[in-house]
Image (tube, rainbow, N blue to C red):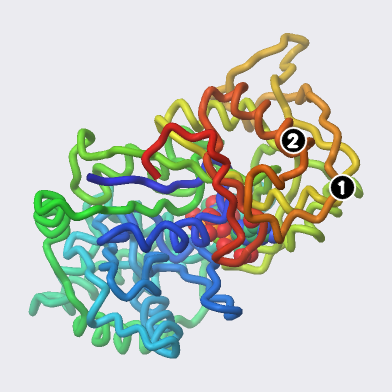
Amino acid sequence: MVDVILGLQWGDEGKGKIVDFFAKDYDIIARFQGGPNAGHTLYVGDKKIVLHQIPSGVFHQNAINLIGNGVVLDPVTLRKESDTVASFGVDLKKNLFISERTHVILPTHRALDKAAELSKGDGKIGSTLKGIGPAYMDKTGRNGIRVGDLLHKNFTTSYIKLRLKHQRLLDNYNFSEEISNWEEEFFDAVDFLKTLNIVNGEYFINEHISKGKKVLAEGAQGSMLDIDFGTFPFVTSSNTISAGVCNGLGVAPQKIREVIGVSKAYCTRVGSGPFPTELQDETGELLRKTGSEFGATTGRPRRCGWMDGVALQFACMINGVTSIVMTKADVLDAFEELSVCTSYKIDGQEVNQVPYQMSKAVIEPQYKIFKGWKKKTSAIKKPEELPAEMHQYIDFINQYLGVPISYISNGPGRDQIVKTGSQKTKI
Ligand code: GDP
Ligand code: IMO
Ligand code: MG
């Protein structure tokens, strides 16, 4: 069976920490989509680590980590990360497996990402510029190179052909940056990648499942960045929702048991695009400062605002979320009052649904106000010790969403998490 952990907002919900926390109970941790645009932070002791390509179960000796076919893989990032985890005694040759169907991010994909963003001017997506969009375009355009192809004697010929195609596109953009250094490190990293375990991912995972092994699928980005259901066009290029697990790993829908949604106790977004509850004032600034809201991949300041119940309910619906882990609850310790958006006003009408073209609608969020708890919560271990005002906040969200909040995360550390007891789930 497969359980899933994924983000319910615009990414950076704290998935890395939560996957690391649950990983001890699983045999395989598998990434099913996205690429090095992800930045998943976790702590080993007091050491902070940010993972981009490798699943967040890598620090658990008994777990196998799988990069699924739905991921786009940059060999250069993987190689750098391999060095990082090696300094903690983790040998990827032993516990990382990569699907041969996984598409490879080439240096020209990164260049194309940059050229395309530059050409959009003010309308830019705010991409992480890791080559994600162009790599997925080559997948759906049936041009891309897959990890299995790296082992093939025709690889260099396929690379040169695709590079020429990309060069023509880059010329159209008048992109003149020199990328030969990128290519040098790319080919070195490809040689390294070839020494890792490259497997038929779909048989690999299904054989483990049929032997009774437990799989934890780790999402990247968040539901509101999903290519189909997110705030298009300000989205990423993959299906970040639970449906992405099936085509990103090759597992059947009946194999999925729990869908654990991770949501911050408030909301953030990095990059451009609609964000109805954004606070462009001192409250937003306080959230950013208290929550250290700066991107784990790009270092950009994250836009901050109150929890958006409408978007969260939408995310629960499309993912089939069975329980929620609410992270960064401790960040709200500092606030006198908290707000949760419970509906939108669009053209004078109150609505409870996310409009299909959120980027075109003028949305006025309608809020329910809560009293803050004004108490330090980061050392709390038991649900009964959480402040009454926090219980009121959680109970309301539980009820509003119709999904239990099973855990509250109250700090970045591995052990800063409280099981609420309000869960019917198996986790
Ligand atoms: P991810 O992309 O979903 O894995 O999230 P990121 O790692 O990009 O961003 C989450 C940030 O919040 C990281 O710096 C984490 O260390 C931190 N974090 C995670 N959970 C908590 C929490 O409960 N409280 C606080 N204060 N920080 C947290
Ligand atoms: P994790 O897994 C937050 C955002 C970018 C941009 C848009 C498209 O750490 O939660 P892309 O690089 O995919 O072309 O960027 O998506 N974005 C993320 N925002 N967390 C992420 O990943 C993100 N990955 C991409 O900022 O707005
Ligand atoms: Mg992140």
Residue type beneath disc 1: Lys
Which type of secondary structure does the marked residue at label 1 adopt? loop
Residue type beneath disc 2: Thr
Residue 313 screen position, x and y as percent: 55, 27
Which type of secondary structure does the marked residue at label 2 adopt? loop
- The residue identified by callout 1 is 374
Quadrant that contains the C terminus: top left
Q: Is residue 300 left or right of residue 290?
A: left
Quadrant that contains the N terminus: top left
Say above or below: 279 vs 207.
above
CA–CA distance between discs 1 and 2?
A: 22 Å
Q: Is residue 14 left or right of residue 217?
A: right
Residue at x 48% of width, y 66% of height: 130
Residue at x 8% of width, y 79% of height: 153
Sequence-wise, the earlier of marks 1 and 2 is: 2
Task: Looking at this view, name the residue that lies furthest to the top.
Answer: 349
- The residue identified by callout 2 is 277
Q: Is residue 154 left or right of residue 391?
A: left
Residue 299 screen position, x and y as percent: 66, 68
Q: Which residue is nearer to you in this view: 77 or 409?
A: 409
Residue at x 71% of width, y 11% of height: 350
Res. 63 in view = yes
- Crowd tier of the residue under label 1, counting other residues whose Cα lies within 10 Å: few below 14, some 14–19, many 20 or above: some
Residue 271 screen position, x and y as percent: 64, 53
